[in-house]
Amino acid sequence: MLDFAEEFVKAYAEQLKTDDVLAWNFYAAMCNVGWDHPSLPGFPNSDWDAASGATFRVAAEIVASARGKGEAYTDWYSRGASKPGESPIGTVNEKVRALALALGWTPVFPPSRH
């Protein structure tokens, strides 16, 4: 089955390594956000549980690993957006949305956020 994080990292590995703001916004976009793709069963999924997403810790581990800079997941995990251009956790900024859409992925938010 396709995985949003895996596809995003594969496509944008170099950008994630060099652009701290993109890396943060990718992390923020994985937390409490599902990702849907035409090849996933039931597309389009209005049920965010059926979409590809990650927990805060898993998302932090993905970003730290993708950057290859010896960072720990705790360098990303729930630190909060603190630099200019960083989006709040659980949101998808325009750049991440556009990069994801180029790969066929669209965000699906929890029911309480519709």
Image: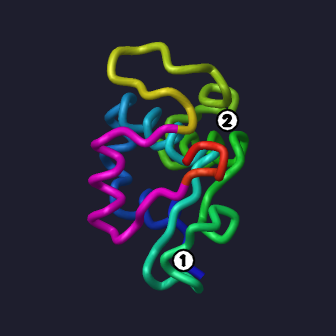
Three-letter amino acid code at disc 2?
Tyr
Q: Residue at x 53, y 58 (%)?
A: 108
Which secondary structure lies at badge 2? helix
Q: Residue at x 64, y 51 (%)?
A: 110
Q: How many marks?
A: 2
From this view, report whether residue 51 is shown above or below residue 112: below
Query: How many C-alpha atoms fall within 10 Å of the one at disc 2: few (<14), some, or many (≥20)?
Result: some
**Is residue 80 on the magenta stretch?**
no
| Residue 59 location (% of width, % of height) | 62, 46
Q: Which is more toward the observer, 65 or 54?
A: 54
The residue beneath circle 2 is 73
Calculate the distance from the C-alpha at mark 2 to the C-alpha at mark 1: 23 Å
Q: Residue at x 29, y 42 (%)?
A: 94
The residue beneath circle 1 is 2
Q: Which is more toward the observer, 80 or 62?
A: 80
For the N terminus, which image quadrant? bottom right
* Left or right position of 13 against 89: left
The tag earlier along the polypeptide, 2 or 1, is: 1
| Residue 52 location (% of width, % of height) | 60, 65
| Residue 6 location (% of width, % of height) | 52, 64
Three-letter amino acid code at disc 1?
Leu
Query: How many C-alpha atoms fall within 10 Å of the one at disc 1: few (<14), some, or many (≥20)?
Result: few
Q: Residue at x 59, y 86 (%)?
A: 41
Q: Which is more toward the observer, 9 or 51?
A: 51
| Residue 83 location (% of width, % of height) | 41, 15
Q: Quadrant of residue 79?
A: top right
- Stretch of the chain drawn in magenta: 91-108
**Is residue 100 on the magenta stretch?**
yes
Judge depth for marks 2 and 1 and give the one in front: 1
Which secondary structure lies at badge 1? loop
